[in-house]
Amino acid sequence: MHRLLPGATIGILGNGQLGRMLCLAAAQLGYRTHVFGPEADSPAEQVAGVSTVAAYTDESALAAFSAAVDVVTFEFENVPAQAAAFLAAHTKVRPSWRALEVCQDRVKEKQFFASIGAATPPWQPINSLADLKTALTKVKPPAVLKTSRLGYDGKGQAKILNASDADAAWNTITGGKAHTTNGGAYAVLEGFVDFRCEVSVIAAREQDGKIVCFEPSENVHANHMLATSTVPARIDATTAAAAMDIATRAVTALDLVGLLAVEMFVTSDSTLLCNEMAPRPHNSGHWTQDACGTDQFEQLIRAVAGLPLVDPARHADVVMKNLVGADVNNLDGYLADPAAHIHLYGKTEARPGRKMGHVNILRPKSS
């Protein structure tokens, strides 16, 4: 493995809260950080050693950034393809652009899951209103229409409860404007799943191929956003092992160096259906910061820096709760609870729907 020496600089593309926590993890291991993103006074900029505030399409800024760092990683995957390709031509980028390309397109993502033998909910690619109406005869409502790229936390999505909702759903995700497909599908139609719970697995992979997984977390969403992650998840050991096996197969097939989060539905008969994946730290992995010997952020830094991964064994039960909007104004109960570990992101404006931080509430380990 190519190991970075202490004092080397890790570049992070993206300057949000995930970048902030990556910077803190890197500092503990003796590395400097340089973040790149379009927003000033961002969560990551507040703690990084160096920050570049520029558009992802600014090649002169990208060139200066690549020259100033020893390796580049990502705090989110929805960056322009040309930015990632430009950086990869100038410095080491981990994970590779191939992994990002698969994960930022829902059609490619679902085709990838099929290629590794992992099941998904029923789906169809959509490029027009006519496509959507035809697809609704195959993927029966209720269903959800999603843009194939750039959507997250419920953005770029529209529910379809009846076939008559097709026109309104198409208008919602296109805004009534012409769309471009970039050679693929503009959207996907996904059938609803009668699931017992949702889980996710965070897998880390070293440069030499060693893989370490955190155990599955059970996730609950509210208003299209993750609300809580609970560990241990309410699934049996066989299902947990199968979920970690899917994440292991995925990270291997992508030849990814870094982290991969895989979200899955668990049906009533314990079948696992893959929903989506992300090649970066993930909101559903924040519980690892206080309940494990090492967390997802340190594992990513170790992987991209060429350090060995370590056993992330859990030492406590935990519930991670997102602090969204005005939640951040009601912290007294958590502050008075020694079992509650608060992580705030440095954001000053508590807008509705805005992630302001999270809290990990620990309990003695039960299993």
Image (cartoon, rainbow, N blue to C red):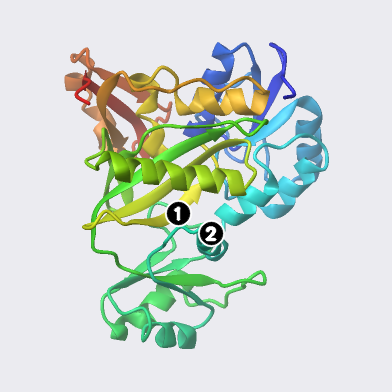
Spot the residue most to the front: 238
User: The disc labelled 1 sits on which kind of residue?
Assistant: Glu
Residue 87 visible from this viewpoint: yes
Q: Are marks 1 and 2 in contact (CB under 8 Å)?
A: yes
- Give SS at disc 1: strand
- Does 107 sit left or right of 351 as displayed? right
At 47% across and 70% down in the image, what residue appears?
Answer: 188
Can you see residue 51? no
Residue 30: image location, x then y, percent: 62, 11
Q: Position of residue 143 (x, y in %)?
A: 32, 72
Q: Earlier in the sequence, mark 1 or mark 2?
A: 2
Q: Which mark is residue 109?
A: 2
Counting from the top left corner in percent of width and height, residue 291 is at 33, 21
Q: Nearer the viewer, residue 125 or 151?
A: 125
Give the answer, above or below, for where 304 lies relative to 24.
below
Q: Position of residue 97 (x, y in %)?
A: 69, 48
Kind of residue at disc 2: Glu
Quadrant where the N terminus lies?
top right
**Residue at (45%, 48%) from the top-left corner?**
246
| Element type at mark 2 | helix
Report crowding for label 2: few under 14, some 14 to 19, many 20 or more residues within 10 A (C-alpha).
many
The residue that mark 1 highlights is 276
Residue 31 drawn above or below residue 54: above
- In the rendered structure, the answer to whether residue 313 lies left or right of residue 307 reads left
Q: Residue at x 27, y 74 (%)?
A: 142
Camera-side residue: 261 or 150?
A: 261
Vertical placement of residue 143 versus 266, above or below: below
Image-quadrant location for residue 70: top right
Q: Residue at x 53, y 76 (%)?
A: 177
| Quadrant in the picture for residue 209 | top right
**284 sits left or right of 298 in the view:** left
Characterize the local packing of mark 1: few (<14), some (14-19) or many (20 or more) Cα atoms within 10 angstroms. Answer: some
